[in-house]
Amino acid sequence: MKRRSVEYHRKPIRVLNSVMRGLNQVGLARTALDENTLIARARNDTGLADFGADDRFMTPFRLILEGLETEARLNPSGRLLARINLLRLLRHRLLVQDLLVRHPEILERDLGDPVVIVGLARSGTTRLHRLLAADERFLHLRSWESVNPVPYAESFKARDEGRPERDPRVTAIEKGLKAVLYMSPQVAAVHPLGAHEVEEEVGLLQHGFSSQIFEFLNRLPTFGEWLMNHDQVQAYEYMVVLLKIIHWFRDDPQGQPWVLKTPQHMQDLDALVRVFPGARLIFPHRDPVKVMGSLCSTCWNSIVRDSDHLTPEWVGPEWLDKVERMLHKTAGVRESQVAPGQQVDILYADITADWQLAMARLYDFLGMPFTDQARQGMQAWLNRNARHKHGEHKYALTDFGLDEQQVEQRLQFYRRQFDIPHETRNPHTRTNEPEDKP
């Protein structure tokens, strides 16, 4: 028998949803998710009215709202969490516009040409990202900056007093992470969380309302299809604006390169290279069978929270189709829009077998020396992040309506293209089961 998502919820959450559902039936505690109500509330909360002249974000914003009402089948707590998330993004856009009016020099910041990791989720992108971020020559985002990139009045005060821990954006994400880990405890084993962890820029892309985050939180197939097939330059341009705000607030050195990564770049590589034409791109590759099992588990552990009606078997076919399309899309962009000297491929198996040798090869590609500082910083990060530190990430393809033969058949073109070894018989490693780091 298929298990519905409600069976995975903690008992207090089930009780809360039951109470809220009862109140909704008598016209009380209904969570509004309509455009006018949300925009009015964001304006009231901030005391600001101007979202700026660029209103391209409204198209995906409206698609998300429609999907939340007609496709996501949200439970009451899911509706409330969706509202909180959308209001956060709208408030930030108002604050951004106000900040830029007062400080137009922010847009003149020089971000340099970033190093960008472009790979499927669960293919080692997080590990590679955090290793490179240990090199002090690169700039990187922290988790609290990705979620709350726009400084508040209190943020300036905390910075100027030399007490960054008092920044309300930091305390806000610390509280938020506690709530996330209570409602979805397995998330920590899937993706290491922490307010000050090195984090990807998908949270910045979310501010353009053109982000796969929404698909990881809720069932939104119509929005997902639009995201796959439409140019996302507006979201990437807005991501640059947010990076410049963070850069300005931190007073980072002009031109110092960022190290960036998010699996969404696999879907939107065309937008990425248009916005960052000088970016140097690193493409990690992992056994697609292993990737799909881990990816499905990641999605399920996130999406299960906000609906009582989803089943794990829905996740597998949905994301297998999405991964196959992303791989083809990325291959086409690499061939037609990215110069050979601007891109490099690396195997997850090689990083697992000898990370220092693999990183030395990447630094050759970047034209940078692999310094003692970089090597020691990376080793220190590895020492702090031992395997299964946050619990073991357990999953199986069959949990999600897939099997190994099916995945192999659909994605064998990708394995052949990059000569990706099967992890169960990987000649590069000493063991048959390399650690499952994201």
Image (cartoon, grey):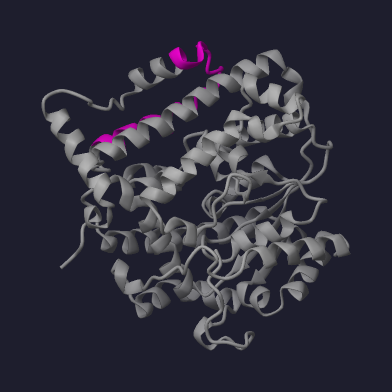
Q: Quadrant of residue 21?
A: top left
Vertical comparison of 371 with 417: above or below: above
Extreme residue in the left direction: 26
Query: Picture coordinates of residue 136 (x, y %)?
Result: 81, 51
- Residue beneath the point at 28% across and 25% down: 32
In-front residue for pair 310/158: 158
In the displayed structure image, the side of residue 435 where residue 28 appears, left or right: left
Q: Position of residue 385 (x, y in %)?
A: 62, 64
| 242 on left or right of 268 | right
- Is the residue 39 above or below the residue 181 in the image? above
Q: Nearer the viewer, residue 215 or 168?
A: 168
Q: In front here: 268 or 425?
A: 425
- Quarter of the rendering occupied by the C terminus: bottom right
Bounds of the magenta span?
Answer: 43-69
Q: Confirm whether the magenta stretch covers residue 61.
A: yes
Residue at the location (75% across, 25% down)?
161
- Residue 399 vs 343, above or below: the answer is below
Residue 430 point in image, percent of width and height: 62, 88
Q: How many marks?
A: 0
Q: Is residue 17 visible?
A: yes
Q: Magenta stretch: residue 137 in it?
A: no
Q: Is residue 45 left or right of residue 219?
A: right
Locate residue 33: give its quadrant.
top left
Q: Is residue 422 visible?
A: no
Q: Nearer the viewer, residue 414 or 161?
A: 161
Q: Which corner quadrant holds the N terminus?
A: bottom left
Give how far across and how far down residue 431 sits, in percent.
Answer: 57, 87
Q: Is residue 155 above or below residue 228?
A: above
